[in-house]
Image: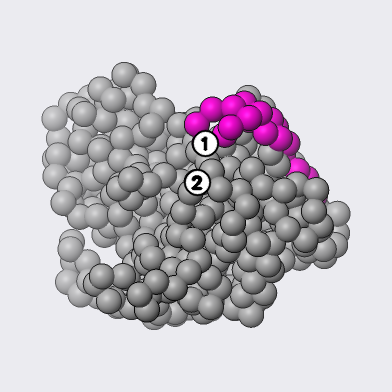
Amino acid sequence: MKHVCLPLFLLLTLSASAQTTVKQDADIANMVNEVSAKNIETIVRKLVSFKTRHTLSDTTSKTEGIGAARNWIKAEYERYAKASGGRMTVTFDEFTQPAGSRIDKPTPMKNVLAILKGTDTADKRVYIVSGHYDSRATDVMDAKSFAPGAVDDASGTAVSMELARVMAKQKFPATIIFMAVVGEEQGLYGSANVAKRAKAEGWQIDAMLNNDIVGNTYGMETGLKDNRSVRVFSEGVPAAETEKEAAVRNSVGGENDSPARELARYIKEVAERYVEQLDVKLIYRRDRYLRGGDHTPFSQQGYTAVRITEMNEDFNRQHQDARKEKGTDYGDLPDFADYDYTQKVARMNLSILANLALAPGRPQNVGIVTSGLTNKTQLKWEAPKGGKAPSGYYVLMRETISPYWEKKIFVSGPSAEIGYSKDNYLFAVQSVDADGHESIPVFPKPVR
């Protein structure tokens, strides 16, 4: 991989304002720049053209309903796959959802998965980028009315599809899955099926990026318009945490260092290296009030997953029948979407997926030594399992009140002694290769 170096000014809590150099992979930068707002708009408008993509809508028509939409998505993924040299395969993930909440009868459903197989057979890691392709009108059970769903969530589906187009031509040691899921508006049914299947089949999902509502820049009521900022929602207490894990978390003050929070910090640091005029806002919640998303079923299965969402939302657009009422436009129509903004979000996703899929895996069994009283901090760990060996590791540290890592200390071996007290700072360890691709950091557990 070729690299260019960009100057970056950072204000660090643990040191004075300093100039440092950030290494940027030129090949990843080229992929980032290939992401097209025009292509994204074309995808969104095509999805809107199916009139409704309600999960319970028509599956037999070639031009309208959920069936026509999923067939078109699959065909597009298959078109992109032709550039992969046989490494990308496209498939339906099919299941029948029993009658239940927001499902009035047993309903066959299909997710669409484009799987770009990793080139390293010893590297079992999987990375997922996802959007949901179903839509809804005001009545969640209305499967007939026009439900354009341009921003919610044709925009997220377009992110997944455009990344598949760009990345299909490239080779990565780890596997990347570009996913369009169904049944989100009815109860996260599509993502839940994939997450359960992944757990049952032993998929080693290292990170899941859920893009849901990433095409609007205007905030109703406040009147704010922001085309630079994007939110990343991450859970604090892991959904699948055991009692033993909770006890450890409570003992070390690790409530802000869940795997999802480490992924969120990673997203901010790496994406802002590659995408201009981007401000990644870390939101320390699993999701917004009264809302849910397709990352949650993956979190519940113990995987590291986050939600990526626009900074400001226009609720006159979401879950609304398309209409004009008292001079106000309602409905999730494509003319109100900001495709340059969705392009920026897609570029952010690509920079993360590419860096992670090229990086070594996370260090294993990361521990912070607590065998005695000392004002220094000792850390030890093991190399990642499978895949390429790291060229070294970064020990990360920050003050306990800081949301971001403030220092990165390179070490070549599987241990480090740092001249800062573990009582006063938080630490993590990440793998890094010779080209600067970094893994997700791992927060240490107490060890003797």
Disc 1 packing (10 Å; few <14; some 14–19; many ≥20) = some
From the image, tell me which residue sits under label 2: 140
Q: Secondary structure at mark 2?
A: loop
Q: Is residue 70 above or below residue 444?
A: below
Q: Residue at x 25, y 37 (%)?
A: 254
Q: Which residue is mark 1?
A: 102
**Residue 50 location (% of width, % of height):** 69, 62
Task: Name which quarter of the figure residue 248 lies in.
Answer: top left
Residue range in magenta is 88-108
Quarter of the image with the C terminus is: top left
User: In the picture provided, is 319 more to the left or to the right than 126?
Assistant: left
Horizontal and vertical percent for residue 173?
A: 68, 51
**Taking the image as drawn, is residue 109 in sight?**
yes
The amino acid at mark 1 is Arg
Q: Is residue 172 left or right of residue 370?
A: right
Please tell me whether residue 95 belongs to the stretch shown in magenta. Answer: yes
Q: Is residue 176 magenta?
A: no
Q: Earlier in the sequence, mark 2 or mark 1?
A: 1
Disc 1 on helix, strand or loop? loop
Q: Does the rendering let one see residue 332? A: no
Name above or below for residue 134 compared with residue 76: above
Q: Amino acid at mark 2?
A: Val
Contact flag, marks 2 and 1 (Cβ < 8 Å): yes
Residue 350 at x, y percent in the picture: 57, 64
Which residue occupies the foreground of this view, 296 or 386? 296
- Camera-side residue of 289 and 300: 289
| Type of colouring | one colour
